[in-house]
Image: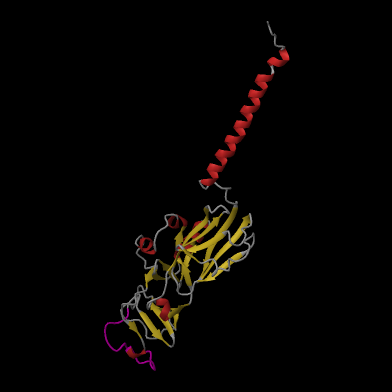
């Protein structure tokens, strides 16, 4: 007996095969997706702009633009330590919001902002080296309140953002990696110098004009016991006499000898002259 197959029946097998292939593809895509998610490949981090800055002891983190970060999804780290709560980071962090922390006498090296997705994947959103020295353990800022204090890295950033350079000023205390330096004679830093990201020591080594003088508390600090405070015309009582960079405590303030040319070995006993610059108050 002979059976014949119609053309309609011939088409059934290919159609079934195609359906099975599509179904298998869908299943495989689902399995692969689940595996990749299992390896932490979650949704991408939000796109936004964040600025980290410093004003004296105040460290700021500002949301410039882009996606809002819900509270709990971001962490603010200072040298790897979670400081989110100290910054007031228990709020939704959106454009225009600035979070700040008064670091007081704590050292601040690097500040970082990290986003963590709901899958537990962390992404670094912003990071900046502040370089603020701590003053614990008998440091300079434990004893004195600086009148004009500027972080060196912040100053370099400002010079790099300028058209050609900026003045160092006179009597400003610059802080760099735990060191304190006083600017004198209003010297000028070129943008080309700042572009090399030098430490203060590297920068002053390029010049020989004493534009920045390091504060050294290990040396003698002069005070009224070294002179007759009732008569500034009297000489200092005994050697060694102050020289450029010498510190002088008088009437609740700290001064630095800034004589670079004349009378270098015999500055006036009167701190209210151009031979001295007031840099801090005694605590």
All told, the count of numbered labels is 0
Q: Nearer the viewer, residue 282 or 163?
A: 282
Q: How far from the left and from the top, in percent, is residue 2?
A: 68, 6
For the C terminus, the image quarter is bottom left
Q: Residue furthest bottom?
A: 230
Residue 230, magenta (yes or no): yes
Q: How far from the left and from the top, in percent, is residue 93?
A: 62, 61
Identify the residue at horizontal 30%, vertical 82% (top origin).
241
Residue 45, magenta (yes or no): no
| Quadrant position of residue 22 | top right
Q: How far from the left and from the top, in percent, is residue 206?
A: 36, 60
Identify the residue at horizontal 63%, vertical 31% (top origin).
23
The image's colour scheme reads secondary structure
Q: Is residue 234 visible?
A: no
Is residue 3 toward the left or the right of residue 186 in the image?
Answer: right
Q: How far from the left and from the top, in percent, is residue 53?
A: 53, 63
Magenta residues (range): 226-242
Considering the whole magenta stretch, tell me its main secondary structure.
loop
Residue 104 drawn above or below residue 13: below
Residue 144 drawn above or below residue 13: below
Identify the residue at horizontal 56%, vertical 39% (top origin).
31
């Amino acid at each position: 007996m002979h059976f014949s197959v119609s053309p309609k029946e011939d088409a059934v097998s290919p159609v079934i095969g195609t359906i099975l292939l599509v179904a298998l593809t869908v299943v495989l895509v689902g399995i692969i997706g689940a595996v990749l998610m299992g390896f932490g490949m979650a949704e991408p981090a939000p796109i936004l702009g964040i600025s980290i800055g410093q004003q004296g002891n105040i460290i700021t983190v500002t949301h410039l633009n882009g996606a809002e970060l819900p509270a709990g999804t971001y962490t603010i780290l200072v040298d790897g330590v979670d400081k989110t709560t100290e910054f007031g980071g228990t709020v939704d962090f959106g454009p225009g919001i600035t979070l700040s922390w008064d670091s007081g006498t704590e050292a601040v090296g690097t500040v970082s902002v990290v986003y963590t997705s709901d899958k537990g994947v962390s992404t670094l959103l912003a990071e900046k080296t502040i370089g603020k020295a701590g003053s614990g353990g008998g440091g300079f800022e434990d004893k004195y309140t600086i009148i004009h204090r500027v972080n060196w890295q912040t100053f370099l950033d400002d010079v790099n953002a300028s058209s050609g350079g900026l003045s160092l000023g006179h009597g400003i205390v610059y802080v760099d990696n735990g060191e304190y330096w006083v600017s004198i004679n209003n010297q000028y830093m070129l943008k080309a110098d700042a572009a090399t990201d030098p430490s203060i020591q590297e920068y002053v080594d390029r010049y020989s004009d004493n534009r920045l003088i390091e504060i050294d508390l290990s040396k003698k600090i002069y005070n009224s016991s070294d002179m007759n405070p009732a008569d500034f015309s009297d000489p200092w009582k005994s050697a060694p006499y102050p020289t450029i960079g010498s510190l002088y405590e008088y009437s609740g303030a700290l001064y630095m000898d800034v004589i670079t040319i004349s009378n270098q070995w015999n500055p006036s006993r009167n701190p209210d002259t151009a031979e001295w610059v007031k840099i801090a108050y005694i605590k």
